[in-house]
Image (cartoon, rainbow, N blue to C red):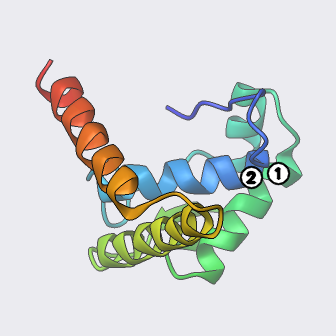
Amino acid sequence: MFIIQTKDDTPVYVQLQHQVLDYIALGILKKDDQLPSVRTLSKELGINPNTVAKAYSNLELHGYVYSIPAKGVFVKSENVTDLVYEQKLEELKTKMRDCKNVGIEKEKILDLVDKVYEEVDEYVEG
């Protein structure tokens, strides 16, 4: 279910957080769904359990999941999807500011947005 990109500069715990949020936004993870245990996921991905625990802790801190001692970590509620969308839009704003700061013109960004949407539509339909 989760995939770690070892050649990616993004820290592993952040990759995990993003994947959980993506799965929530897509409806793959729903309210009260249990996430894999720290031990299980760390073994499955071949990473340190502290890395998984850090990802889960950050997700809980931001209100996306909740934990029950000795039971596990669960998706918090249906409203989490709204939180995920807000977070994704904030990430996009940051990236757009970065693009503008290095001189990329608005038209090029809009062209890229159109292209990415077409690619996603083809992937979903294909």
Q: Is residue 121 left or right of residue 11?
A: left
Disc 1 marks a residue whose amino acid type is Thr
User: Can residue 52 be seen here?
Assistant: yes
Check disc 1 and report the residue beneath it: 51
Mark 2, secondary structure of its residue:
helix
Q: Is residue 67 above or below residue 108?
A: below
Are discs 2 and 1 less than 8 Å apart at CB? yes
Callout 1 environment at 10 Å: few (<14), some (14 to 19), or many (20+)?
some
- Quadrant, the C terminus: top left
Query: Is there any visible trace of residue 69 in the rendered image?
Result: no
Name which residue lies at 83% across and 35% down: 47
The residue that appears at 40% across and 71% down in the rendered structure is: 89
Q: Position of residue 43 (x, y in %)?
A: 77, 30
Residue tagged 2: 13
Disc 2 or disc 1, which is closer to the eye? Answer: 2
Nearer to us in this view, 7 or 104: 104
- Foreground residue among 60 and 118: 118
